[in-house]
Amino acid sequence: MQVFRPLLFISRVQRFCLRSQSVLFTANKFNKMSTQNRPRVFISRRIPEKGYALIASECEIISWNFDDPPPRNEYLSTVKGINGLFCLLTDKIDVELLNEAGPSLQVVSTMSVGYDHIDVMECNKRNILLGYTPGILTNATAELTMALLLATSRRLKEGIRAVQTGEWGTWKPMWLCGPGLDGATVGIVGLGRIGFAIAKCLKPFGVAKIVYSGRSEKEEAKEINAEYKSFDELLKISDFVIACCALTSETKELFNRDAFKKMKPSAVFINSSRGGIVNQDDLYKALESGEIGAAGLDVTSPEPLPVDSPLLKLDNCIVIPHIGSATHSTREAMAVLAARNLLAGLKGLPMPCQLK
């Protein structure tokens, strides 16, 4: 098996291609055919065609036309001399990469609402414009969060396995009962766009109360009758705790041993924001010991989560592979916005969504 791996790697690299036909990559070399004075842009992954076509109409494109990321060394060698970078949230845009790109790099546009993968301070120091894609994935992520909330609270993981293994027998009054949303108190940590959308989705399920925490009270919370609470109070009174906050120095491992101890033993914890806001060792201990009732995660740290992670062995924990924005229309709209951000920045025009 080891004999064939280098050959497989070379085959993938040889297909590292330029779909606009202005640059060809073969055997680790770029051959410049025709630049037509267009800005050079690297697209680090296969993206929806509509977004790609927008960039191709005005730029010379180098693209890694695969769903998986390019090897780091290829990424670093490819960004040399580019003017624009279209990246994803899994791409580490750090000092090393910016140094390799050099002074020609004007714009970094990420196809994501999160930007903790980008060294924003370093980009600002170099006057590199930054674009991102907020708002577009709000409804899709809220929808997925609701799906995860229901699947976790109603114990669908165990139910599906019972059908598959033949454990399902006669109807039993106490079997696979879980907490319902009807009459529950739901706590949302971070009432931003996504948190607000989730709160609206919750209303038809008959929840008794929605509470939220954050840096300050939100005027729009009145629309959904949500009450502002301190983080500690929210943990204490909530039947369901949904994490919707960005990953910052303040929120890193916000959900840790102390936080889980403050939650109800029956509480369900849901995270569809960033894996880094949770101490996963502490979460495992809280779930395994019965300190909290259940958890549903669309995000983890690291991603992908290793298959031997103890979280995957728990019946009361559901983990899915960061698919909050995974609808066809949402991903296409994200690609288009990221492309427009990129093109505007290259022209020196205001981006539709620019990080300040």
Image (tube, rainbow, N blue to C red):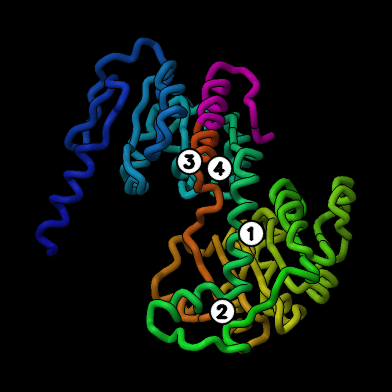
Q: Residue 112 carries which label?
A: 4
User: Which is nearer the eye, 181 or 69?
Assistant: 181
Earlier-in-chain disc, 4 versus 3: 4
Judged from this view, the residue extending furthest toward the left is 3
Q: What residue type is labelled 1?
A: Met
Closer to us: mark 4 or mark 1?
Answer: 1
Which residue is rendered at x = 53% and y = 32% of the image?
A: 338
Earlier-in-chain disc, 1 versus 3: 1
Give the SS element for disc 4: loop
Which residue is rendered at x = 50% and y = 77% of the image?
A: 159
User: Which is nearer the eye, 44 or 124?
Assistant: 44
Q: Mark 1 points at which residue?
A: 146
The answer to whether the residues at label 1 and label 3 have Cβ atoms under 8 Å apart is no
Earlier-in-chain disc, 4 versus 1: 4
The residue range painted magenta reads 336-356
Earlier-in-chain disc, 2 versus 3: 2
Judged from this view, the residue extending furthest toward the top is 36
